Amino acid sequence: METPTDITPERQQTSSPAAEPALVPRPDVPRRPPVKAWLQPALIALIVVAAFISCYIGLQRNPQPHHIPIAVTAPGLPDRIHQALGTSVEVHPATGAEAARRALEHRDVVAALSSDGHGGLLLEVAGANGASTTSAVKTLVSAYAHGAGKHITTEDVLPLARFDARGLAGFYMAFGVTLAGFVLGSNAVGLAGLMRLRHRFWLLSGASVAIGTLAAIIAGPVLGAVPAPVVPLILTLTLLAAAASFSTKLLATYLGPVGLPIATLLLLTVGNATSGATIGADLLPAAARAVSALLPPGAAVRAIADLSYFNGAHATGPVVTLALWAVVAALLLALRARLVRRRASVTG
């Protein structure tokens, strides 16, 4: 048992707050930080907040339809729709109502317009395409029907899941997985001195599988908001997490301190804002539409919707996009490590 006399002066000094040594400036830290040390963090923070607000609010303040694909049947109706609505829609003539509905269910179009047999029009939509896209189609076709003096009946043939009334579950899922992958990759940046590259690769890969599995189970079977088959959904979300984590590590490795802010802008800001979930891709400005499907969040949102409501009709392309992001980033990281070793062996 320890007695008061067993306590050494050194231990007494550390246990007494008043006896703590004064802070001594490190000799390698300048008394006056350079201007760059003040400006860089502040500028990066300002760029991130400006980009975030500009993307999320700017893209939603005035969405305009651009070539929204609509299957149209009935003699002469495709031409009349095209003349009335112009470039707002992209008319796909169909041989009949059944062919138009198949195109809708296959996600080749976002709506099908045909005659209702009583002199009016029947508009079939897929609520699974998102509220913004569905609303835009209804508005456009209703305007045409009003001008033509025709009654229009609307039917949602592919409604959203019961627990995803606003159609945003896919977006939140993609955002959450992208965020988790970003955090994973940014934490792996500081492990270079503790783990070999292959071990860091195993960490990123294994954690990506865990992230994808957990997200798919929570949003699917547990909450019932995403009705996609669990195994394909796990694969998609695993690839999304891997794409985000490996890309984040890649940017930080190649670009240094500014790599993480760039990853934030690319993946969490631009990627999620242009994903087509909150605002349908057909309603985005041209520049946003161009990058929407090429960035991991946009590819993931498309794959999730395809798997959930359209039997995976067009899920292959987005899944390949996610795989390419992960694989290319991993290869570039491995290449840099090899070049660094070769340079070290030459100079050594």
Image (cartoon, grey):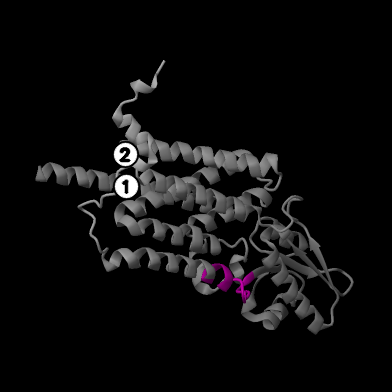
Q: Alpha-carbon distance for marks 1 and 2?
A: 9 Å
Q: Is residue 318 above or below residue 18?
A: below
Residue where numbered disc 2 is placed: 197
For image coordinates 68% across by 61% down, the residue present is 130
User: Mark 1, residues whose alpha carbon is within 10 Å: few (<14), some, or many (≥20)?
Assistant: many
Q: What mark, if any, has residue 113 been given in the picture?
A: none
In the shown orientation, is residue 227 left or right of residue 261? right
The type of residue carrying mark 2 is: Leu
Residue where numbered disc 1 is placed: 333
* Quadrant housing residue 111: bottom right
Which quadrant is the N terminus positioned in?
top left
The type of residue carrying mark 1 is: Leu
Query: Which structural element holds mark 2?
Result: helix
Q: Is residue 283 magenta?
A: no
Residue 280: x, y in percent? 62, 65
Residue 225: x, y in percent? 70, 48
